[in-house]
Amino acid sequence: MIYKQDFSLDNYVKAASNKKLEELVVRDGLTNLYNHRYFQERTEEEVSRANRYNLVLSLVFFDLDYFKNYNDTNGHINGDQALIKVAEILRNSMRKSDVVARVRKTDIVARYGGEEFVVLLPETSKDGAKVMAERLRKVIESQEFTGEDKLPGGKLTISAGIASFPDDASTRTELIEKADQACYHAKASGRNTVCLYDK
């Protein structure tokens, strides 16, 4: 028996609307990056996949330096614009000459919360993640942000911490915690730097 598919305009509009709703559910409203919930779900999936197929997986935890000061000095509208700009850099940062140092389509870039961002890097070693994170740190440092001259150092910068599976963690929760600890260490070490998790 042959079934006739209905390619009517109404069905097309419904399908497009459903796709748009699905996107809204997984996207952060300000930055249009993936949101915290989607990041958690995908991290769980990627840890399971890495465990099943004996793969590596790295996570980079980014935090904007002195961002509370930036908001207090320049206002939340400029703060939102800075977050949007950083998100665009993280999402669109492509490097033609170095495959290791670019954000790939398979990588998950998300807003973790506030001024915190994460990049989940399937099948990427900690060293590969460091190359990518360091490159992004330099790109953000080189950008101009409204009112950044009032911050310590005169620039809006970002600190990053990196952890990997299975070397540093065996679960999603541990991977996030270890990357966060490495990011905290980067901030405690003077900010505007990238640190690897070290047991």
Image (tube, grey):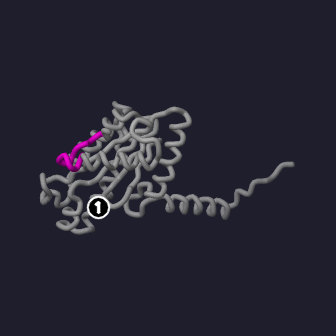
User: Is 26 left, or right, of 82 in this rendering?
Assistant: right
Residue 68 x, y percent position in the rendering: 23, 63
Q: Secondary structure at mark 1?
A: helix
The residue nearer to you, when weighing 90 against 128, is 128
Outermost residue, front side: 199
Q: How many marks?
A: 1
Residue pictured at 51% horizontal, 52% vertical? 41
Above or below, 134 relative to 158:
above
Magenta region, residue range: 186-196
The 10 Å Cα crowd at callout 1, few under 14, some 14 to 19, many 20 or more, is some
Q: Which residue lies under the disc numbered 1?
A: 81
Q: Is residue 72 left or right of residue 174?
A: left
Task: Name the one closer to the observer, 11 or 171.
Answer: 171
Q: Residue at x 58, y 63 (%)?
A: 17
Asked if the magenta segment contains residue 190, the reply would be yes
Tell me residue 166's x, y (percent). 44, 37
Q: Quadrant of residue 29?
A: bottom left
Per the image, is 30 magenta? no
The foreground one among 16 and 38 is 38
